Image: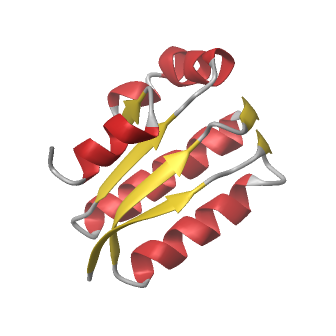
Amino acid sequence: MSDEIQILRPQGRLDSASSPTLEREAFEVIDGGGRRLLIDFHGLDYISSAGLRAALAVAKRMNAAGGRLALCSLSPQVAEVFEISGVNAIIDIHVSAESATARLTGG
């Protein structure tokens, strides 16, 4: 089990074509013993319902493993999708990587 923070940085679009890759990469971190995962959405322009499902699946797997997941740096458009869907109430979302890192390390 690792307390080191692992970071994933999806780029462009997170949709039905790309969300399986993010999900697979996140599951590899979790299944490999990672218990602190930050998904930095700084380079993400668009998220679809498939992307939201992937984020929820990652959150569920990390929760079951007893770890922590945080998202950060959502564009206004991506943040709006999380808010409208209510997923922002389920997943820990931060304005910056610094605040997410502080949360993941227990600060």
Q: Say which residue appears at 26% left-offset and 44% top-offset.
A: 102
Above or below, 6 against 29 in this view is above
Q: Say which residue appears at 44% left-offset and 26% top-offset.
A: 95
Horizontal relation, residue 36 to residue 83: left or right = left
How many tags in the picture? 0
* Residue 91 visible to an observer of this rendering: no
Horizontal relation, residue 19 to residue 104: left or right = right
| Colouring chosen for the image of the structure | secondary structure
- Quarter holding the N terminus? bottom left
Q: Nearer the viewer, residue 65 or 77?
A: 77
- Quarter holding the C terminus? top left
Q: Position of residue 55 (x, y in %)?
A: 53, 47
Q: Nearer the viewer, residue 88 or 107?
A: 107
Considering every residue shown, the one lying at the far front of the view is 98
Above or below, 68 against 97 in this view is below
Q: Nearer the viewer, residue 101 or 54?
A: 101
Q: Say which residue appears at 33% left-offset and 35% top-offset.
A: 99
Horizontal relation, residue 70 to residue 35: left or right = right
Hey, which quadrant is residue 51 in on the image?
top right
Q: Nearer the viewer, residue 87 or 25?
A: 25
Q: Position of residue 42 (x, y in %)?
A: 63, 36
Above or below, 71 against 64 in this view is above
Q: Position of residue 93 (x, y in %)?
A: 40, 32
* Residue 81 visible to an observer of this rendering: yes
Q: Say which residue appears at 65% left-offset and 60% top-offset.
A: 22
